[in-house]
Amino acid sequence: MKVGVDYYPEHWDRAIWEEDAARMQAAGISLVRLAEFAWSRLEPTEGQFDFAWLDDAIDILGRHDIQVVIGTPTATPPNWLVAKCPDVLPLDNKRQPVYPGVRLHRCYNSPSLRRYTQIIVEKMAGHYGKNPHVIGWQTDNEMIGNDSHSDAAISDFRLWLQKKYGDLETMNRAWGTVVWSGEYSDWSQVNTPLGGSPHMNPSYLLDYKRFCSDSVADFNRFQARIIRENCSGQFITHNLWGYPVVNDYYDLFDSMDFASVDYYPSTDLANDSKSRVYHGALTHDLTRGLKQKNFWVMEQLSGTPGCWHPMSRTPYPGMIRAHAWQSVSRGADAIVQFRWRTARIGAEQFWHGLHDHHGKPGRRFDEFTRFSEEARRLSPLLDGTSVVNDVAMLFSHDQLNALTIQPQSDGFDYLANFKQIHRAFLRLGVGTDVINWTSDISRYKLVVAPFLFLINDALVKTLTGYVAAGGTLILTTRTGVKNMNNVCLPTQLPGPLSELAGVLVDEYDPVGHDTQFVSLAEGSTFECAQWCDVLTPTRAETVGTYASEFFAGRSAVTRNRFGNGETYYLGTVLKDDGYKAWFEGILTGLNIPVMPHLPVGVEVSVRADGERRFLFVLNLTKSEQVVELPEGDYQSVLSQLAAPKHLVLEAMGVEILRSVYKI
Amino acid sequence: MKVGVDYYPEHWDRAIWEEDAARMQAAGISLVRLAEFAWSRLEPTEGQFDFAWLDDAIDILGRHDIQVVIGTPTATPPNWLVAKCPDVLPLDNKRQPVYPGVRLHRCYNSPSLRRYTQIIVEKMAGHYGKNPHVIGWQTDNEMIGNDSHSDAAISDFRLWLQKKYGDLETMNRAWGTVVWSGEYSDWSQVNTPLGGSPHMNPSYLLDYKRFCSDSVADFNRFQARIIRENCSGQFITHNLWGYPVVNDYYDLFDSMDFASVDYYPSTDLANDSKSRVYHGALTHDLTRGLKQKNFWVMEQLSGTPGCWHPMSRTPYPGMIRAHAWQSVSRGADAIVQFRWRTARIGAEQFWHGLHDHHGKPGRRFDEFTRFSEEARRLSPLLDGTSVVNDVAMLFSHDQLNALTIQPQSDGFDYLANFKQIHRAFLRLGVGTDVINWTSDISRYKLVVAPFLFLINDALVKTLTGYVAAGGTLILTTRTGVKNMNNVCLPTQLPGPLSELAGVLVDEYDPVGHDTQFVSLAEGSTFECAQWCDVLTPTRAETVGTYASEFFAGRSAVTRNRFGNGETYYLGTVLKDDGYKAWFEGILTGLNIPVMPHLPVGVEVSVRADGERRFLFVLNLTKSEQVVELPEGDYQSVLSQLAAPKHLVLEAMGVEILRSVYKI
Amino acid sequence: MKVGVDYYPEHWDRAIWEEDAARMQAAGISLVRLAEFAWSRLEPTEGQFDFAWLDDAIDILGRHDIQVVIGTPTATPPNWLVAKCPDVLPLDNKRQPVYPGVRLHRCYNSPSLRRYTQIIVEKMAGHYGKNPHVIGWQTDNEMIGNDSHSDAAISDFRLWLQKKYGDLETMNRAWGTVVWSGEYSDWSQVNTPLGGSPHMNPSYLLDYKRFCSDSVADFNRFQARIIRENCSGQFITHNLWGYPVVNDYYDLFDSMDFASVDYYPSTDLANDSKSRVYHGALTHDLTRGLKQKNFWVMEQLSGTPGCWHPMSRTPYPGMIRAHAWQSVSRGADAIVQFRWRTARIGAEQFWHGLHDHHGKPGRRFDEFTRFSEEARRLSPLLDGTSVVNDVAMLFSHDQLNALTIQPQSDGFDYLANFKQIHRAFLRLGVGTDVINWTSDISRYKLVVAPFLFLINDALVKTLTGYVAAGGTLILTTRTGVKNMNNVCLPTQLPGPLSELAGVLVDEYDPVGHDTQFVSLAEGSTFECAQWCDVLTPTRAETVGTYASEFFAGRSAVTRNRFGNGETYYLGTVLKDDGYKAWFEGILTGLNIPVMPHLPVGVEVSVRADGERRFLFVLNLTKSEQVVELPEGDYQSVLSQLAAPKHLVLEAMGVEILRSVYKI
């Protein structure tokens, strides 16, 4: 386990570099990320390179036993490049340039961007590819979106479509352009979605989003290739910004050695809804699922965020340490705090680091050093462990994009609904792996595959095989609606999965915010909203019925035994309590242990390997909480004390427990 | 009476056309609208025409005794046309192209649009002008707005102004351009309202809106001329989209044989305010008033609407039938359901038709067939009847536009206020004709002429003559403010109508949402808002006084006997209950029968001819309702049973009653 | 004291000019403002001038003993100029033209605007520079903003920066452009903030706002120079629009003889929050502070405002008179009502003047004549008096701009927070001078210097000297954060003022809308919000401590004796009651008399000279109010009656009192 900081020596007087490095070393820091926005310092004008300052910084850090990750600076094309090659700038959907907001002002399809990226990355990789202090690379920074309508983007889009469809006739048919006379008779008629009207053909819009995502992933692969050709023994990663995004992150990371994430949990504890408290855990689970292995946090909350937007609350006492441990508990192997010093200059002056502008250590720095000391102490125990779960949730950027193009009902939001399901497991103390919907799922006891709006034969086969072999599968409403071209299927819902589910959707009511009621088999009634499928079981049994509206008494939830397993179909969207109650029954039936009395805001996670098993218990609230531990005897690896059955955690309290016998 | 569907054979495999036609025939369908967006299929590339597929479709339908209405496809210029002639696209007020949202992407002033419209419409009219299955034409689709700032639009606007004003000096004077140095010294300085600033001269803005409206009406006349020249014995109509719109619909329909409307009542029954429930009735009354005769519904609600916006609630059981009968009750002679099959492709995939994507008949289709069967059965009775009322309301697109350019106070909205008055009559069971403000009104017992903000001598003469001859007229606040150039009159309000009203406005307070109170003569007090004229009766008597604010005790409502009739002046805007109480008194005085106890959401309407008279009673709510019928004995023409005095209507229940004696 | 009206003879038939002038004279009007939008009448086409009509109007007015102020018409470039020189139009941040909204359509950096301004102003000044009826000039109209991105603006901005920084390297260093590779390597790379992204470098953005402000002030100086060169014995002023604005009004008025303001208090009395009631007083105090002397109201509320936006409430009976006296009470020496007649034409048709469209005198005109008569009667008493206060508040456009670029927390708004402090003094009946933060403050007993976010050595020296010499100074949170380049200082807060305040900020929490509590020394607890500095007094004593959150018990408010004076530091933002209670204690300690029981909406102000002293007591509410007068015996100069200890003021009542003995 590594603890580090993000550091910008180029922003500070060289006189303090040495002092900073010494203070870092004293604080247990063994890792620094450098240079990811420093293009104008590394290549001040075209073709003139200056790496001396960075060499010095790395030398100083190296002398204090600090390893370095170098970021390629391509997120910030310098002014000379924009002035010389205006095609570096994206064009918006009215074909007007998107001017620099000092950052992310680049069209991924721009030939100039490629040319100058190649030059600077090659130079840097050549220069640092064998530097013993440099252990790895971060490509670019928080790559999101590419909604450019430049000539290059339009031209690349046409090529992308030609590659996918071969000829126009095939594309016209696949997209159903006959509607509203949208048929193309020549490739030159095909543009990116100029004007931004939402009325456009959804098949076209989904392909455009895929093209945008591919453009970004391709730019990342391009950088990775250059680095690999010039470096040896150094890893390559990228730091992702949060969800939701258009980009398919699974594709974005296919060229990376492992995933990294920038993590800024909300500090607004006074107003956080229950839903937001659990957002961070999902971010971590999604990130871990990108490569299905441990990951890094490349930027970790160190102070109040704020810049052009108002500052948020300062992190509550204990929050910096607690969230660093939260990241570790869910699979982080390195915690890099953003940032060492709060910037005195530039647009992020109030995105606070570990030190305030005056540079003296204070409360937040002290919290960090406490974490750093603990991490150093526990590192031998935790190294090599990872997060292993019995439950998987299938995530899909394609579904996210398709359901954003065509929102199904008021309040229906793919990511929010996904989060809600994930949250129900969190509140039951059950870990979930959140993985790509195309992943192998055979090893899981329970798989939740929500909102499979788009579907293909491969997925039907995977899911059918999984259940036949004994797996338990949960499907939901809005499943099997469309093929991968975003065209509606002619089959009765849930379409190709109706046999596996043993159920047919007779009709549906997009109830939106009109709350309805559903009785689960055990007699208790829960609220539901957004959507109501009125079900006719063909082979399934009904386990939940509607208790309101004209469809009262009709099936809402079913269970179908199929092969050695079973498939649940949920025809509506529950609220938190409904999900929790329903899942508790299913999990108990599968002998997956649950902790149904966890206080809101307390999270648990397990890191283990063949031998070791550590239970993290984290109080992410600003109040004391009492947690009833599962059966067994536990010892704290932080304090070495035996844990009481009812563990008392102070506000932002953290415990890491080892079972005295194997749990 | 005809029952039909909108059908898009070009979206479906030819294999199912025959099956569809047979199922239509079995369901009692005798009418299909076709082809209104099929330009790219009819003319796949410039000058290459393919009518064979449409010929086939019409043949198949014809063989099943189904008649056809053909839509001209000009609402969807195909990609080849946009690519070849970019001037087809409108320019927005920043002079940027309005790119295709796949529909309505055309500048009505574009010469290229005219040229290619002429070609395709001429070809179609020539081809189908004598086809025995084709009974008529629909021009274009839902023509609204033309807010283009293209070179052609600017040039046409200058010509339009030159024709209207002759010379610049006259126009400068008429518009009062001297304010803020807005005087033009050369025609080349006159533009469309570029930039969209709301600060512009209101006389100029109103003329621009008139020009836009004329451009649209002219385009419709242009198509009608081509069709008439090439066809014989076929009608021409156009399907209008709802209110409000800039376009003057009376002008738009001057070249049409009858009016048609697309009707999508809200399915949001759980949250509908009282006001929205009655919206559909006004739409029907406005449509009937366009040509002052029966009309068609060219698109009728058949399932939940939804596309790029979230889907609404599915139509409540009974709603499809009830609203079809509602349309008939207010003057529709044909009901064309939109659409036969829900689209699997394109942007309207979730704008549901009678069949879901899987194509099997279900609950909604069954409801439709019930209506279809009833309509077929009652057709001999209803054919030839029409809606005849004693009350008229005068509607004006000029007032709508002028009051949109200059909203008078918070909450003051011409259409909403108009609706509110119309609703009061609906709740009293009194039918109203809603007609153009320039229409002949001599045959009505009561005329409501609200918000005559703009006024001219002709109208003053019409209204004066009407009252002198014995009519009863209701005028409201914001009357007589301006001349037709949107310039304020120098007369004390209500200006040229002050003699007819016998009252002068001493001062006014735009009270907006600050609710005030008014006591009507009978002693009861009602809420009012938006605007308060403080009145000084000159010859009128006071029938309502303010009960709040610094003008408490001053006149708010007056009645003036003039000639053989009388004029009411209402100096404020009442709430629903106030209007209902006030109108009930006036109507009773005029011996117009009222039904003051109608439940909210229950509508009545009468269709009659010299002999026959049918009372429609419609429960448009999702609860059972009891209606006290007017004096007399009634028999249901649906069930042939005698109707009880207190008629019980189930949710979405419909009754059509014949008086055993003439009512 | 002068009473006048704004008049537009060019909008009206010449036949009524004479009648208008006679009615003005009869109403006591001795002043008229003319011509400020009449460019197209004065120069109908390029180079053709027509002053004859204006000569006539001035002659007629002169014959009725009415003096004239002429406005230069440069706020409305005529159509011929825009058509000939499109560079007159500003470009928005996407570089699209900002088309005329009939007014303010000009780029202050446009060379064409300068050229044609020079011509028209020179002609007018030459023509009227010695006219005996013309007593002065108003430049342009309500100059605000200049957010143009034209070639001329970009070029001027580069020159402005070159003048300020000399070379690029200095500018790069001053702005900290190294962040995000924002360094410039050539002046041609420097643009105005195209695209409008809020992510930009705050040092750059602040300089851009200063440049915009300078462009406007320079245009005003340019006009003033031309007028001075051509006129003699005539004053020059400008009429400012309200706050907040980007422009530095102190700079804007440096070329003016005195300040004028356009004053439209809210008529929405039914819904006005306490905060809005006091807005007008601050506007007056700010205006008086611009030149630190009496000012004019060039446009005074005369009827409901309304145009393209809905009309507001009509002025409540008494309001027109009461607000005219309010202006006088706070330093106005002339009240010019906007406008004589309500316009019948153009975009301001519903911005009501003293007469309605019909032109007959009514209630509002009667109120005005009452004021006019009173003003004429009291003029001998009031002439020569001015407003003198013991308390000053330091206002700064630089702080306003810097804190707008980087809002500090939810709800933190410089102007709103400034208003809140000002309001607390108003509610205590204590007058404040609101002056530029660079002004001499030595004569004040108490100086409030809120939110000195940016700071420089000169200010530190001024404040330190003031306190050392015995002054009392109140500082607040967010003080001493940055240098004048908008770069954060490396010192612990409040930075360079920490010695004067005797306190250090340990850490801070941007609490936003999360209300916290602070106990002031006297034991009472008040709400605070937005921001909490956690203080460590170094030499100061604690006078307030937090009573909530993790910093409960820590210092929130301190007092530091320094030299002969003392400095308070307030580490948070109080609510109204907290400010009122805290200030009452401080004021009492300084022997500044307070009126703590003033009803909400009642304002007092004192005008005095060496001999005379008049206490204005104004009830600006729509209810009767009772005011307990300070010790002493008073006589009304309006009624000559003795004033009771508990003065009863009717709604909108006004009293002007003279102490029978010197108060």
Image: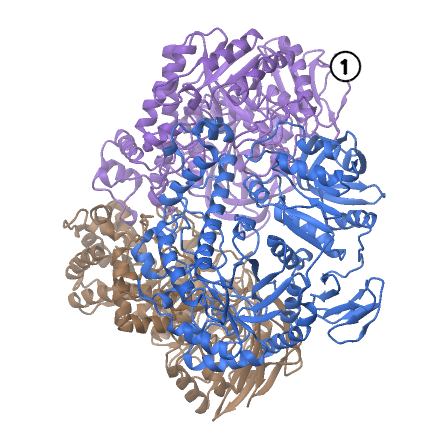
Chain colours: A brown, B blue, C purple
Measured as percent of width and height from the top left, residue A509 is found at 58, 72
Q: How many marks?
A: 1
Residue B506 found in image quarter: top right
Amino acid on which the number 1 mark rests in the picture: Ala
Q: Is C148 displayed left or right of C415 in the figure?
A: left
Residue A224: percent from left, percent from top? 23, 66
Placement of B87 over or under C6, stated as above or below:
below
Q: Is residue B356 above or below residue B447?
A: below
The residue depicted at 39 percent of the width and 32 percent of the height is B187
x, y percent for residue A274? 55, 64
Task: Name the one closer to the observer, A339 or B319.
Answer: B319
Q: Secondary structure at mark 1?
A: strand
Examine the rendered structure and indicate whether residue B477 appears above or below residue B317. Answer: above
Determine if residue A311 is in view.
Answer: no
Work out whether residue B537 or residue C399 is closer to the camera in this orientation and state it. B537
Tell me which corner region of the image, top left, top right, bottom left or bottom right, holds residue C352: top right
Label 1 chain ID? C
**Circle 1 crowding by C-alpha within 10 Å: few under 14, some 14–19, many from 20:** some
Residue drawn at the location 37% of the way across and 24% of the way down: C219
Is B633 placed left or right of B236 in the picture?
Answer: right
Q: Which residue is mark 1?
A: C642
Q: Locate residue A524, reporting x and y percent.
A: 66, 78
* Residue A22 in view here: yes
**Camera-side residue: B203 or A314?**
B203
- Which residue is rendered at x = 16% and y = 67% of the image? A229
